[in-house]
Amino acid sequence: MSLDRRLAEIAREFPEWTIWRSDAGRWWATRHHPLTSAQRAAGCAMTIDADEPDGLRELLRRQEAHAADP
């Protein structure tokens, strides 16, 4: 699967995040909106990264769970 397709799939799955792959090959995601103090206290991050797309998806799922239940 192409890089563009993987990026597009993750972006569709997590529309509240901007997804990209760095020149160094790491996968990144940054939230579109600032975190509340409760979300920060719950362990949410504005930007996360992973070695590969499935790892990023897993981190995004965890972040979404933290944000939903601060």
Image (cartoon, rainbow, N blue to C red):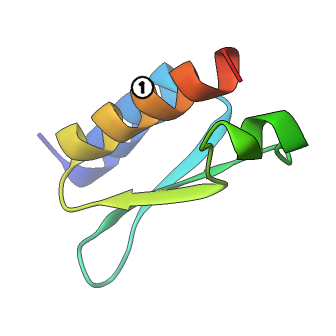
Q: Residues within 10 Å of mark 1 (few under 14, many from 20)?
A: some
Horizontally, is 41 left or right of 37 in the view? Answer: left
Q: Quadrant of the N terminus?
A: top left
Q: Nearer the viewer, residue 20 or 61?
A: 61
Horizontally, is 60 left or right of 41 in the view? Answer: left
Report the residue marked by disc 1. Answer: 61
Name the residue rendered at 61%, 52% in the picture.
45
Residue 35 is situated, as x and y percent measured from the top left of the image, at: 82, 44
Residue 47 in which image quadrant: bottom right
Label 1 secondary element: helix
Residue 49 is situated, as x and y percent measured from the top left of the image, at: 39, 61
In the rendered image, the residue lying farthest to the top is: 69
Name the residue rendered at 19%, 38% in the picture.
54
Horizontally, is 38 left or right of 45 in the view? Answer: right
Whether residue 36 is visible here, answered yes or no, is: no
Residue 17 in which image quadrant: top right
Q: Nearer the viewer, residue 50 or 5?
A: 50
Q: Quadrant of the C terminus?
A: top right
Residue 33 in which image quadrant: top right
Residue 46 is situated, as x and y percent measured from the top left of the image, at: 67, 55
* 33 relative to 66, above or below: below
Whether residue 42 is visible here, answered yes or no, is: yes
Given the image, on which type of amino acid does mark 1 rest? Arg
* 63 relative to 18, above or below: above
* 45 relative to 6, above or below: below
Name the residue rendered at 28%, 69% in the picture.
26
In the rendered image, the residue lying farthest to the front is: 41
Name the residue rendered at 60%, 44% in the picture.
43
Numbered disc total: 1
In the rendered image, the residue lying farthest to the bottom is: 24
